[in-house]
Image: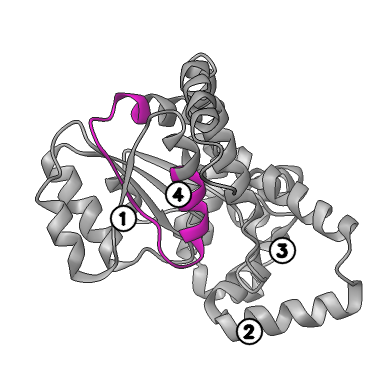
């Protein structure tokens, strides 16, 4: 997990902060017994530099980092749900609880996802010859939302199935096409295959994920990260939905509001309004 965090933040670190991270990576096995004073003493840096470092990489302090690393190693779907139920029993699931969660999760997400990255995603969508989407498991609903919204703008998305059926679609991938892939918690084999083959054919790719770093991420042309909760938390899908809606609204803006399509949709509905009641 430490190496993944490092890959995510390495471009923003100062020289001193690189030294701190190098020390952590070299002593990862000893992390449970390392203290901030140990690091300051070994590296000859001030304790204030150490304190600022934890915030820089998304944690409150060293204890917070240790907890995240431990939970990342031990988390399972059962442990996440069990832990969430225990916490909800103590705190109660209220509107304030959810708003606090979403606020913190959005803050962590948009430390990574910049306005320029969203602009790049819009440009990739508008320039694509054909768009293909792989949205498995919990991301299926978010993928359907993106497909539904973009279809109204005249942008068609071909949804890819799971399993070996993806090969039937891959024969049509070509330079100038776009792959939109979802990989939350893990990146499925189908997405791995699509990323690799897409890179070979010149087909660009956007990957929605909650994974901070890894070799596969470098194969995507653009990675849109969403924080969904700590490793041992229940993983909320609120922020991925917000990120998707933000991408849609920026696409609408780039198309001048999509008024022509909206007007045509209204005309079609009025022409056939007596035939379909829903």
Which residue, given by chain and number where applicable, does mark 2 sit on?
79
Q: Residues within 10 Å of mark 4 (few under 14, many from 20)?
A: many
Residue at image mark 4: 208
Residue 247 in sight in this render? yes
Name the side, left or right, on which 100 lies relative to 76.
right
Circle on res. 215? 1
Q: Is residue 253 located in the magenta-colored stretch of the structure?
A: no
Q: Earlier in the sequence, mark 4 or mark 1?
A: 4
Q: Is residue 138 magenta?
A: yes
* Residue 231 image offset from top left, x and y in percent: 60, 69
Relative to 79, does residue 137 appear above or below in the rendering? above
Cα separation between marks 4 and 2: 24 Å
Q: Which residue is mark 3?
A: 64
Q: Residue at x 63, y 66 (%)?
A: 235
Classify 10 Å Cα crowding around label 1: few (below 14), some (14-19), many (20 and above): few
Counting residues from the start of the chain, the first of labels 2 and 3 encountered is 3
Query: Of label 4 and label 2, which has the lower sequence position?
Result: 2
């Amino acid at each position: 997990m430490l190496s993944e965090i490092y890959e995510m933040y390495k471009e923003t670190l100062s020289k001193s902060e690189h030294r701190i991270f190098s020390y952590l990576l070299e002593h990862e096995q000893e992390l449970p017994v390392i203290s901030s004073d140990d690091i300051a003493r070994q590296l000859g840096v001030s304790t204030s530099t150490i304190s600022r470092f934890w915030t820089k990489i998304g944690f409150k302090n060293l204890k917070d980092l240790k907890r995240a690393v431990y939970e990342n190693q031990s988390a399972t779907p059962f442990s996440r749900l069990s832990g969430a139920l225990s916490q909800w029993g103590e705190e109660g699931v209220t509107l304030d609880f959810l708003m606090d969660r979403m606020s913190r999760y959005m803050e962590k997400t948009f430390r990574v996802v910049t306005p320029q990255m969203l602009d790049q995603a819009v440009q990739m969508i508008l320039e694509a010859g054909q768009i293909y989407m792989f949205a498995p498991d919990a991301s299926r609903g978010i993928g359907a939302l993106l497909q539904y919204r973009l279809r109204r703008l005249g942008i068609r998305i071909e949804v890819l199935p799971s399993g070996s059926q993806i090969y039937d679609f891959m024969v049509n991938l070509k330079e100038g096409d776009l792959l939109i892939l979802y990989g939350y918690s893990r990146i499925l084999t189908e997405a791995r295959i699509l990323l690799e083959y897409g890179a070979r054919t010149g087909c660009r790719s956007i990957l929605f994920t909650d994974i901070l770093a890894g070799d596969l991420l470098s194969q995507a042309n653009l990675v849109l990260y969403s924080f969904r909760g700590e490793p041992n938390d229940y993983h909320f899908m609120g922020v991925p939905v917000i990120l998707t809606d933000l991408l849609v609204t920026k696409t609408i803006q780039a198309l001048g509001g999509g008024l022509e399509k909206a007007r045509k949709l209204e005309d079609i509905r009025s022409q056939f309004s007596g035939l379909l009641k829903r």
